[in-house]
Image: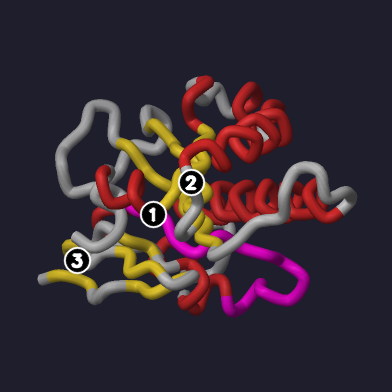
Amino acid sequence: MNVGAIVESGMSFGPYPQGHCFHIERSRLYGRIAHGVKMAEMIVLPCAAADPPRLWIIEAKSSTPRPETQPSFDDFICEIRGKLMNALTLLIAASLGRHENGRDALPETFKTTDFARADFRLVLVINGHQDAWCVPLQDALSKALHATVRTWALKRTSVAVINDATARRYGLIDL
């Protein structure tokens, strides 16, 4: 059974097989902590078996400020960093049972995923962006998430800024 498509920022994510997408923004778990806590849209566990398992933490946007527009560009990068970090932290906290019924809020497939070995991807997907426009955003977001990548022992390539065309190639949207 598939979970219906999730429409965010003019893009249709999914549909994903049952248990392979945690739509955080619509979860009761997030609803209980939402005040003052910004969050990424979803976490996707692709149905193709991967070793180690790969989890995509996704924030979607329909536009971004240009790097030369200061301070709005820096504020934007800071906001995206926070949303991706909060989603990673909430996922781990829920899996550890730090929230009442938090583990129960996770899809079954997530409950059996070995997070200790998982390959996390922190991904910003921007609708309609040209590939060249993603490069300065990628650089800035990678720099902003450098400490996270280091402290969580993530791969250098774990931070990505992609457009809708690339997201489609990865099977994240319009499946």
Task: Tell me: residue 24, above or below residue 129.
Answer: below
**Label 2 residue SS:** loop
Q: Which residue is mark 2?
A: 130
The residue located at (65%, 25%) in the rendering is 151
Q: Which residue is mark 1?
A: 164
**Label 3 residue SS:** loop
Q: Which residues are magenta?
A: 31-44
Query: Label 3 sits on what residue type?
Result: Gln
Could you tell which of marks 3 and 1 lies nearer the N-terminus? Answer: 3
From the image, state whether disc 3 or disc 1 is nearer to you.
1
**Label 1 residue SS:** helix
Residue in the foreground of this view, choosing between 66 and 96: 66
Q: CA distance from mark 3 to mark 1?
A: 23 Å
Residue with the most extreme left position: 1
Could you tell which of marks 2 and 1 lies nearer the N-terminus? Answer: 2
Q: Is residue 94 visible?
A: no
Q: CA distance from mark 2 to mark 1?
A: 9 Å
Could you tell which of marks 3 and 2 lies nearer the N-terminus? Answer: 3
Query: Label 2 sits on what residue type?
Result: Gln
The C terminus: image quadrant: bottom left
From the image, state whether disc 2 or disc 1 is nearer to you.
2
For residue 142, which quarter of the picture?
top right
The N terminus: image quadrant: bottom left
Judging from the image, the colouring scheme is secondary structure
